[in-house]
Image (cartoon, helix red, strand yellow):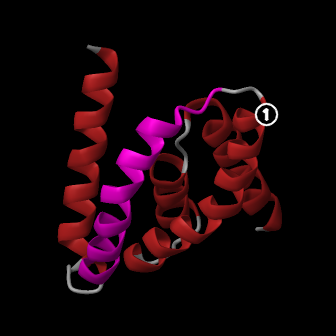
Amino acid sequence: MIVKLVLIGLITGLCNGLFGSGGGTILVPSMIFIMGTEEHKAHATAILVILPLTILSTLVYYRSSYISWPLTLKVVSGGIAGSVIGAKLLNRIPSWILRKVFGLFMIIAAVRMVI
């Protein structure tokens, strides 16, 4: 089990560093389908796991001058409000609906990335 968790973490960190993504796209399905974690716990845990990964990736990007501060500040202003609303809604949404909405979101994101 430890090896699975470390591999999931390695893949998640790699995707987070390369693509700026990993929490939802890698961690949540991995925790649900490989580790058998309940939906709500998987989503909440993914957010916490991504925090240190994001901080480290941000430092690397910052040192390379890849960050657009005006863009960052605009997106963060809405992101803060959205994250509070989303975290509160997570506890109110049944697991089966959460799974469907998350799956639909991933499909839409994948199609948009390819097209």
| SS for dot 1 | helix
Q: Residue furthest top?
A: 115
Residue 76 x/y as whole percent: 41, 54
Is 49 placed left or right of 68 in the picture? right
As rendered, which of 14 and 84 lies closer to the eye? 84
Vertical relation: 24 (above or below) 115: below
Q: Which residues are magenta?
A: 66-89
Vertical relation: 39 (above or below) 70: below
Residue drawn at the location 32% of the way across and 16% of the way down: 114
Q: Residue furthest front?
A: 70
- Quadrant position of residue 43: bottom left
Is 88 placed left or right of 58 in the picture? left
Callout 1: 10 Å neighbours few (<14), some, many (20+)? few
What secondary structure characterizes most of the magenta part? helix
Residue 89 x/y as whole percent: 24, 79
Residue drawn at the location 64% of the way across and 52% of the way down: 54
Residue 113 x/y as whole percent: 34, 22
* Image quadrant where one finds the N terminus: bottom right
